[in-house]
Amino acid sequence: MIAKVVNEWTHCEDLADYERLELVANDIDVYHGRYTDEGATFLVDFLDIQKYPVGDLFWELNTVKCQRWNAVGFLENNDINITASCLEVDLSRDQSVRIHASPRFWKFLFSSNSERSIELVDTYDCTRYSATTCVRMAYKHFEMQMFKLDMAELDPTEGTLASSQKAKLDKMKAWENNPLKAYECRKKKNQNNYYFVAKDNQLVCVGCQSSRVNKSCSMVRCEKCWVKHCLEEQKVCKCKDHQKGVKEWKQKALERCADAGIYDEDCIEAMIGLSDSE
């Protein structure tokens, strides 16, 4: 229905330059419960969330039981702009299905591709969000890397994570652009199904700004970068593993240089070049 609305609007003359996009869902969340008028506090029963495969339905169906359900309460409870929309179904009314969406959702939808970013619904008060929102945003960015990510001043160490959010962190571990790569997920003491996010004991390499390095490395560089740094600056890292690694790397480079007929000053340049290519 939202796609239909966008299609009708963007055929207007004023929106001839609209840059189209496609948002693909990977599941369907169905919030159900007794309806109340707008203004009542929307509450989710976290002990009554079920997942169902439904016949030939392509998407997984998640049912979430609520107290004091209403569409406005749902949108206020939502944290990310690209998920801040819903269809309200009430079979007792003549118009049984209605579309509701946050202004942040429409802003994302009708921005140019260069300006579209995954961001908070409420950018004025980040304190209302916790680690769960951080992981949800990072994972949406992982799924839709064509869009930018703006996590504002969110602190991923605030609050706890459920097992489902921990699984999302695990899926992003090998992703080079993971915005939470400087953190690790740990199990909360005496609570098997809950986790918390903490600063990892590893740092990001100061050379390539992407690979990881153990905090014991005095040069704060990954293997490739510290080899190159040691060769260029004629320095030796205090880390014993790195010292051994540089010696092995030099020997390997010398053997290759000899095979290629390269000696003297050119040999050093060749060794440095090898640290970029391997």
Image (cartoon, rainbow, N blue to C red):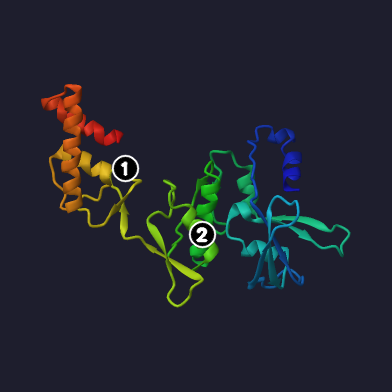
Residue 88's disc number: none
Q: Tell me the crowding category of disc 1: few under 14, some 14 to 19, or many 20 or more residues within 10 angstroms, Cα based.
A: few
Q: Is residue 159 visible?
A: no
Q: What percent of the width, then of the height, locates residue 36?
A: 76, 72
Q: In this orientation, which residue lies closer to the viewer: 95 or 91?
A: 91
Q: In this orientation, which residue lies closer to the viewer: 268 or 89?
A: 268
Give residue 51's quadrant in the image.
bottom right
Residue at horizontal 52 percent and vertical 49 percent from the top: 141
Amino acid on which disc 1 is placed: Cys
Task: Determine whether the residue tagged by mark 1 lies in a helix, strand or loop.
Answer: loop
Task: Determine whether the residue tagged by mark 2 lies in a helix, strand or loop.
Answer: helix
Q: What percent of the width, then of the height, locates residue 139?
A: 52, 53
Amino acid on which disc 2 is placed: Ala
Of labels 1 and 2, earlier in sequence is 2
Q: What percent of the width, then of the height, locates residue 91?
A: 85, 62
Residue 167's disc number: 2
